[in-house]
Structures are given as structure tokens and as C-alpha cells.
Image (spheres, coloured by chain):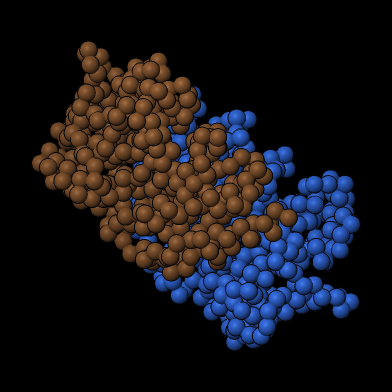
Chain colours: A blue, B brown
Amino acid sequence: MWLMGEFELLARVRERLPAAGPRLRLGSGDDAAVTMPGGATATSVDAAVDGVHFHRECASLPQIGHKALATALSDLAAMGAEPGEAYVTLGVPCDLDEDGCMELLDGMVALAEATGTALAGGDVTRAEELFLAIAVVGHAETPNSLVTRAGARPGDALVLTGEVGGARAGLALLEDAGLEPAAGEDARHLRERQLEPRPRLAAGRALARAGATAMIDLSDGLGGDGLHLAEQSGVGLRIDGEAVPVAAGAARILAVAGEDGLQRALEGGEDYELLAAIPRGRLAHARRAVHDREGIALTTIGEAVEGEGVEIKLPGDRILKPRRGFDQLA
Amino acid sequence: MWLMGEFELLARVRERLPAAGPRLRLGSGDDAAVTMPGGATATSVDAAVDGVHFHRECASLPQIGHKALATALSDLAAMGAEPGEAYVTLGVPCDLDEDGCMELLDGMVALAEATGTALAGGDVTRAEELFLAIAVVGHAETPNSLVTRAGARPGDALVLTGEVGGARAGLALLEDAGLEPAAGEDARHLRERQLEPRPRLAAGRALARAGATAMIDLSDGLGGDGLHLAEQSGVGLRIDGEAVPVAAGAARILAVAGEDGLQRALEGGEDYELLAAIPRGRLAHARRAVHDREGIALTTIGEAVEGEGVEIKLPGDRILKPRRGFDQLA
């Protein structure tokens, strides 16, 4: 009887999907969705699994849907692509009913509408545990207008959108209610950073147009993702840890939680901010463009140098040297 | 330590990926894959979950990989699209090691190479149970050169590629070794139909070019999928059950298994053959093209009529009338 339910669920899903995107010629309900891309496409897939990427007891269903789509779209942001279509596969355990699936979808629909993404198709299946697998397609005029991780050159400035550490502190708050007093007024914002990350799509496009030479989104943290960018560009990254904007309250809460507050804030993943390399002559323009389009700051936090590896300078002359597989949080 | 493993696994996966496809500008390893589609795209996502779509005790790991990609590509076949890129998300339980993941991948790589599909990206995550979520992108010159489920007109002939019932009989054999004597020489072929379906990509393109007005692949069976095509085209389908080619031995084995052999063969899903509607004047051309390109027969099994619903005429004047949710097998 599951599949009787699947048909009905898919019908309900389709009713709730937002209006088609500009490139979508045929949406959900046939063997495949049909689009007319016109130019280059950037495609990425991302999975979110209960107990690995989220915990149903800590996040609402709309938040789980939101975050799964947000993390997928964040990869498009890191390419400087315009979001186009998303295709959602849902693995539904027996303790999640149809209304629950609709709530998950609500979180996705809201973010899809806010970002101009068409939810163009999907699949629903029974599963032991809740999982979401999301494929996203972004667009650009030409392949060269997309920014890879591989183009940073020695001398490029290293820039960061927004602030880091908030998602890590938010996770600590969700895991330990005893930290609440230390968080005070920052608690809500920090939890939001963990549960409802915003893909920096407008900032990513602004950075691409401003001439960013390499870009990556911070899912694994400044150290781990910085290392990807360094390795794929064949450069070293030198980061001034004290220049990195840290979310209000994050270092304090992580310190109360018994960790080195600043270090953990810098290492903590899931902020989904963008780290980019850009020629120094383009910095002022990039900063203005990111502020105008995304409403957040772009901060210079270091530079690309000849060599390899990432070094993050901390107070007291300590140097953090992330390695492969370094402090991945999810 | 999982993620240490994830990095290494992804590196091993990338080494084994086949050469890039004609539209692929940047493959796995960056935030997103970059393609230049040039024309219309058809995109579909499909999931395969252990215990739902396959059983690890019945299928080898390469077969599981093969079938997951095959069922996704089958949706492109049903659009008449040329296969382009595939993006694979793997949920890996703790009892599947890296070598096991490579075996899964081997099954996908072999089918990708055989069909000209580029494995362009993916994601790997820890999970309680093995799952595969595959997004496939196919290409065509224009949206109108793709065939939806919605264009069948009264008077169109209803045609079927290959034979049905084999996958259902193969499943019965896998579930009950006691059926083996009844299967005799047919056993191997029938098990293959269940475990290693072939997406009818060449036949799908041939049917699209020959003028098919509507098309669907048989994942849920002739009744269930016929109903989708009928509903979306706004026609009725009248099928002569005795004209439907049934895989050798399938009806016999299903009869021994205590079922109405012919009826179960017709209803059984997972054959991944194509059901299409086509104007009668194009029949001879379509038959030749499907034979030349896919090496299989195209059989006329009925027609589209004014009205609604699907009726399958069985021997002894019995009429099978599938309804929504009818006899879905997976």
C-alpha cells in the first residue's frame, strides 16, 4: 500500500510546487523535467541523512527541508552560478506521515521561492531513516563565468563573506541547553545559523563578476575548505585568524563549552559562507558589490602565497595548520 | 574518522570515472560539475534503497549499481533523450567498506560506458542502510524533440519494445529457489531481467524520431504505467493481452509460483521496456528503426481510443482494468 500513498503524496507535492522557472518547459509529473538551459550549467548533488547531517529532535521538519536545499544551493553560490532547478529525492521512514513530508517540503518551497529556484522534479521512496538527496542546477552565460576552486594565484587577497563560527556555536547550544545562559541574546541567531543557513547566492555571483579567481563555500570550516582551495589552486593560504569575523557570542559559548573558543569558531563548519581569492585591485569593487547584493560584509582575511597548505595565525603566535580530513563536522 | 574515509573514497571514485562526456567541461572534484548543454535537457532523479528496491543478499554490488543507474537512465529513454551526465549520491552503511563501494561503482561505470553517459559528480554519506540516489541529465535539440506521456491521440497504435514479465519471474526465482527446476534454461535470462535491466535508450530515440506521440518506461508494469500515459494524454488504452510478448518461461514460472501466469507477467513491473503511442502510418518505420538501433522487436499491442482508463483483454474474455496504485511491485 505504500505506493498508493506515494502517488497521492507526489500529487500533493506537485500541487505545492512554486510556479515554473524561466528555463523550465515541463515540470514534475512526466518521466523527466524538460529545460532549455542556454549557456553553461553547474550541477551539484548533496545528501542529508537523519543522525548524520541533522537530528529530527533538534530541528523542525521545515528547517530540515530548508537546510538540505540550502547546502545544495551553497555549492552553486560557490561557483557564482544563478540558481535554476532543484530535484529532490526523499527517503521516508514509517514514522513520517504525509503531513510531515509536506512540512519538509514547505521549508524547501520557501527557500526555493526566496532564491528563484524551481523545484522541478523528485522521487519519493520508503526508507528506514529519513534522507534527502538534492540535485541542483545553476546557470551562467559561459563556463568561464563560473568560478572553480582552482584559479587562485599567489598575491591574490583572500576574502570571506559574513561571519564564521555561528553554526558551530548553534550546534553546541542545541546539544547542551546548559549553555543557554552564556548565550543570552545571541542564542536565537546562533541556532538559526546552524538550522537555517542561507546560501550566499547573490554574493557568489557578485564575486564571480568582480573577478574572483577561486571560490569555495564553507561547509567543512575555514581550515578544511581552505585546504581544498589551496590544493586545487596549487597555492598556499595564509590567514590572519584575528581578522576573521566571528559571529557574536560564538567564541564565548564555545569557550564555555570547554573548547578554545576562537579556534573552534574558525574551524567549525556549516557556516556556508564563501571563501574566495581575488586580485587586490578588485577588492573595493567586490566589497561594494557583495554589500549591495547580499547585504553582508566582505572581509579580507589573508592572502594566497607561493607554496602549499593553509596556515591560520592565532593570538599568542600560535599557528593552526589544518590537514586533510581536518576537523570535519558533518 | 568517517570523513577522512570520505575524502579517500571520493578520490578513489574519481580515479575510476570514465573519460568526460562531450558536454562536460569540469567533472567531479569542485563545488559543481560544469556542462555546456546546447539545446534542451531532460532531467530525472531516481532512488534505490536496500530492502525496498533491491536486497543485498539477492544481488551483487555491481548489479545493484547497474540497476540503480539503469532505472534512472530508463526515464531518459522514455523521453527519447540522448544520455548525457549522471550524478550519484551514495548512502553507505557501516557494513559496506570502500572496496564494496568500488564494486557498486564498477556496475555503474560499465553501464555508463556502454550508454555514453558521463558520471559527472556525486556525494557520499554515512547512512543506516545502503541507498543510491541518481540524477541523470539527457539532451535533445529542442524541447519538442522529447516525447512526454501526454501526447497520445485516439487512433494511435500502442507499441511495446521487447518483452515483459521477465523481471517479475526473475524476482520469483530469486525469492524461491524451489522454482529453479521449472525455469530450466530460462532461469539465467530471467534473473538477469530482474537484476540487470537495460535502459532502452536507442529504442527511445528511434521512437521519438519516428514520431511517437507519447511514451513511458515500464517500471510499474503495463497496467500501472499504461494508466499514467492514458491519464496524461486524456485517452483510453485498449491492449490485447495475447499480443503482448512475454519473456520465455516467465508465464510458466509465475504459474508454478501459484499465480495467474499470463496476468502476472503483464502486470509485473521492472521490465523497463518502453510503451509508446504512435500514428499508424509511422509503424513500419518505427519497427525498423527500433530493430536496427536496439536490436529488439517493436510489437503493436493495442491502440489509444477516445475515453479513459486501460483495459487489457485476456484469454477467455476476461478484461483486466488496472486502477491507480494498481499492483506496483517496487
Q: Is residue B19 left or right of residue A74?
A: left
x and y, in percent, of residue B197 in the image: 38, 41
In this orientation, which residue lies closer to the viewer: B280 or A196? B280
**Is there any visible trace of residue A327 in the rendered image?**
yes
**Of B71 and B78, which appears nearest the observer?**
B71
For residue B236, which quarter of the picture? top left
Asked if residue A113 is positioned above or below residue B38 in the image, the reply reads above
Q: Residue at x 24, y 29 (%)?
A: B244
- Where residue A230 appears, as percent x and y from the top left, is 64, 75
| The residue positioned farthest toward the top in the image shown | B316
> Looking at the picture, does residue B157 appear above or below residue B38?
above
**Side (left or right) of B203 relative to B84:** left
Residue A309, position as x, y percentages in the image: 70, 76
Q: Where is the N terminus of chain B found, in terms of image quarters?
A: bottom right
List the single residue furthest toward the left: B281
Please name whichever residue, A58 or B61, is drawn nearer the observer in this view of the structure: B61
Residue A118 visible, this orientation: no
Left or right: A298 as drawn, with respect to B176: right
Which residue is rendered at x = 46% and y = 51% of the image?
B108
Residue A248: x percent and y percent?
Answer: 79, 62
Residue at left offset 49%, top offset 36%? B53
